[in-house]
Image: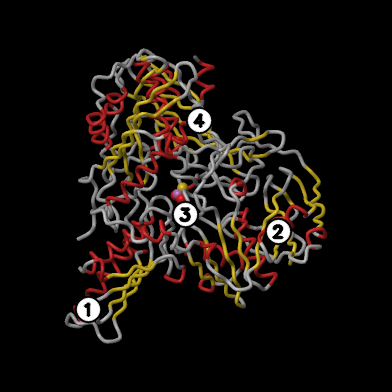
Amino acid sequence: MTTGTGLPRLEGRDKVTGAARYAYEYPVDGVLYVWPVGASVASGTVTNVDGSAALADPAVVAVLDHTNAPRLHPAVIADQLVLQSATVAYRGQVVAGVVATTPEAAREGAEQVLVRYAEHPHKVMLDPDDPDLELPETTNAGFPGTSVKGDVDAALDAADVVVDRVYTTPPEHNNPMETVATIAQWDGDRLLVHDSNQGPAAVATAYGMLWDIPHEQVEVVTEHVGGGFGSKVWPSPASVLTTVAARVTGRPCKLMLSRQQMFTMVPGRTATRSRIRLGARRDGTLTAIDHDALQYTSVIHEFVEQTGSATRTMYAADNLRVRHRLARLNLPTPRVMRAPGKTPGMFALESAIDELAYALDLDPLALRMANEPATEPATGQPFDGRHLVECLTTGAERFGWADRDPTPGVRRHGRALFGTGLASSMYPVYQSGSTATARAEPDGTFGVSVAAVDIGTGARTALWQLAADACGVPTDRVTIHIGRASYGPAALAGGSSGTASWGGAVRKACTELCERIAEHGGAVPADGLEVTANTDADQPAADRARHSYGAHFCAVRVDADTGQVRVDRLLGVFAHGRPVNARTAHSQLLGAMVMGVSMALHEQTVVDPGLGLFVNHDLAQYHVATNADIRGLEAHSLEWADDDITLAGGKGIGELGIVGAGAAVANAVYHATGVRVRDLPITLEKIRRAG
Ligand code: MOS
C-alpha cells in the first residue's frame, strides 16, 4: 500500500528540468497567434471597429469583431459569448481580436485596432445603499440565498452582549504562475484544444455548448497546468476567441494571456461586505448569529459568492440567519477563487467571534469550544465527522496558547509589538461522478486513464497510487494517463473535489478489472483486459453535513512606528482524513496558508470608480506573498479522523488551509496593537491611521 505515504511527484523532475510541456508549448505547423482587444469603456456600445491600420501589416491575417465573428450558443458564463454583440458590459471585455503570423504582429495589430463606442454611465463600486441590490434565491454551490432559523432580531434584543460589525474584503485576482493558454485546431466540425484549465472534460462540454456540437467532437489536452486556484475552471473569453479565430482563418491558432489580461479576461473574487451580528449570554453561550453578506456580479451573468455559507455550519445558536445580497456592476463576472465564499465569509465570522470573546472577557478558544454544535446549525443534519474541537485543542497545545495574556497592545520589545490570534477553518466535502478506464496487459502491467488534471496539487501522483493499491501491484507496474477530455466525463479540479472524484472512479475501475482477471483464472489474455467504470450512481445521499474543519494559530509582530506586519508563525491543524499522498497533501495545506497570509496582508485589486478600471493589474502592484513574507509555517493533520468519507478515502484538501487564515492574522494584529482591522488587506496605513 502506498496510500498515505509521501511518494515524490511523478512529473516533478520533468517540471524542474523544463521537460514538462505546458499548453502553449505544443508545436503546431502553420499556427497563427491571437491577441484580444479589450473594451476601453466600462459600459456602452461598440459603434465601429476599424481594423484597417492593423490589416496594413501583411503579417496580420484577420481582425475579428462582432460584425464578422461566427455565431456562438449560450454556454456556462455569458462572458464566454465573445464578439456576439456590440454591448460592452465592462472595461476589458473582448471587443475584437487580431490574428497574425507572429505574436508580435498580433499584439502590435491589436494596438492599432480603432474601436469607437457610445459610452453609457457605469457602476463599479459595491455599495450597501445601492437601491438596485438583488436578493438571489441561491448562491454558488447551491446554498439558499437566505436562510433563517428562529427569531434572530428578538434574540439580539434579548442578548446580554451583542457584537455588530461590518467586515469587508476587496476584489482579488487569481494569479497562477502560468497564465491562460490555448491552442485551437479545427478539423471539419471536430475541435482539438491544447489548453491550460482545471477540467478538460468540463472544457470540452463548454466548447460543445458554445459551438453547438457534441462534446465528444471536442478533444481537450491538458497535460500540465501551472496553477489555477479557480481561474481556469471554464474557458476564458480569450480562449473562446482562439477557437473563433481558428474557425474563421481555417488554421490552428494559439494564445497566451499577458499577466495584465488575467485581471479582466479571467475571473477573480468579488469584493464582499459582511455585517455580522452575534448575540450571547454572559456565560458565552451564543444565542443569535446573523450574517448579512453583500457581493457583486456583472451585468451579464449572475454569480453569487456563497459568502455566508460557512456561517451555516460553525457554531450552535438557536437563532441563525444568513442572507446574501447582490449588486450588478460593470465589472467582469467574478467567479471562484480558492475557497469561494468561505474565505471572505470566515474572515468576517472568525473576526467577530474574536471581538465577542473580548466583549465577554473570555478566551476565544474557550468561546469557540463552548458553542460546538451537536448537529449542523442551519440544517440540523448530523456531521459526517467534524473534529473542530480536536483541531483547536491540538493547535493550542502545539502553538503554546495556554499562557496567553489577552490584553491587547502590551507586548513590546523595541519597536515591535507582538500578538497572537486564532481562527477556525472549514471547507465542504465535495465529490462527483467520474469515469475511469483500467487496462491490464499480459506482462503484468496496468494502464489507467481518467480525464483528471493536475494543476499543481499532486493529483496525478495520488491517482497513480490509488490505482496501484487497488490493483494490488507496486506502482512501477502502473502507468497513469490524465489530461484528456476523451478519457470520459470527469469532475473538475475544483471545490477540493478532484482527487476524491477521479480517485473513486480509478479505484472502481481497478477493482472491477481485478475481478475480471480473477475470472480468467488470474491470467490476463494476450489482447489484455479493459474495464471502464463510472461513479455517478455511487455518490452519497445529501443527508449528512460533510465538511472538513481546522484551526489556525498565528503570531505576528507589528512595527509600532511603520505599522508593518510580519507573520512570525502560522500554525494550522486540520481534520481531513487520510491523505492519499501525505507529501502533496501537506504541500496543499501550506500553499493555502500562504495564500491566506497573502490575502490578509497584500491582495487587493483597486477599482477606479471613474474609469471602471482594475488599476493595479500586474504583479508589480497587485502584491502576492512571496518567500520573504513567510516565516514559521506549520501544517498538521489529524490523520486518524474521517478516513473513509469519499470514494478515494479522506476529504478534499486544496482549499481548507486558506479559510480562516486571514482572521487568525487580523486577530493577532489586534492582540499585538489594539487596532482592529475589519477591512482586508491589513495595510500599514490602516494600522497607522487607527494607532
Ligand atoms: Mo477552486 S476556487 O474550487 O477552483
233 displayed left or right of 512: right
Choose between 396 and 334: the one closer to the eye: 396
Residue depicted at 52% across the width and 33% down the height: 169
Residue that label 4 marks: 681
Neighbour class for label 3 at 10 Å: few (<14), some, many (≥20)? Answer: some
Residue that label 2 marks: 97
Label 3 sits on a secondary structure element that is: loop
- Say if disc 4 is inside 8 Å of ligand 1: no
Q: CA distance from mark 2 to mark 1?
A: 54 Å
Q: CA distance from mark 2 to mark 4?
A: 36 Å
Residue 646 picture quarter: bottom left
Q: CA distance from mark 2 to mark 3?
A: 25 Å
Q: Amino acid at mark 1?
A: Ile
Neighbour class for label 4 at 10 Å: few (<14), some, many (≥20)? Answer: many
Q: Amino acid at mark 4?
A: Pro
Res 594 seen here: yes
Residue that label 1 marks: 517
State if disc 3 and disc 4 touch (CB < 8 Å).
no
Label 1 sits on a secondary structure element that is: helix
Residue depicted at 36% across the width and 40% down the height: 426
Label 2 sits on a secondary structure element that is: strand
Residue 272 drawn above or below residue 500:
above
**Which mark sits nearer the N-terminus, 1 or 3?**
3
Q: Amino acid at mark 3?
A: Gly
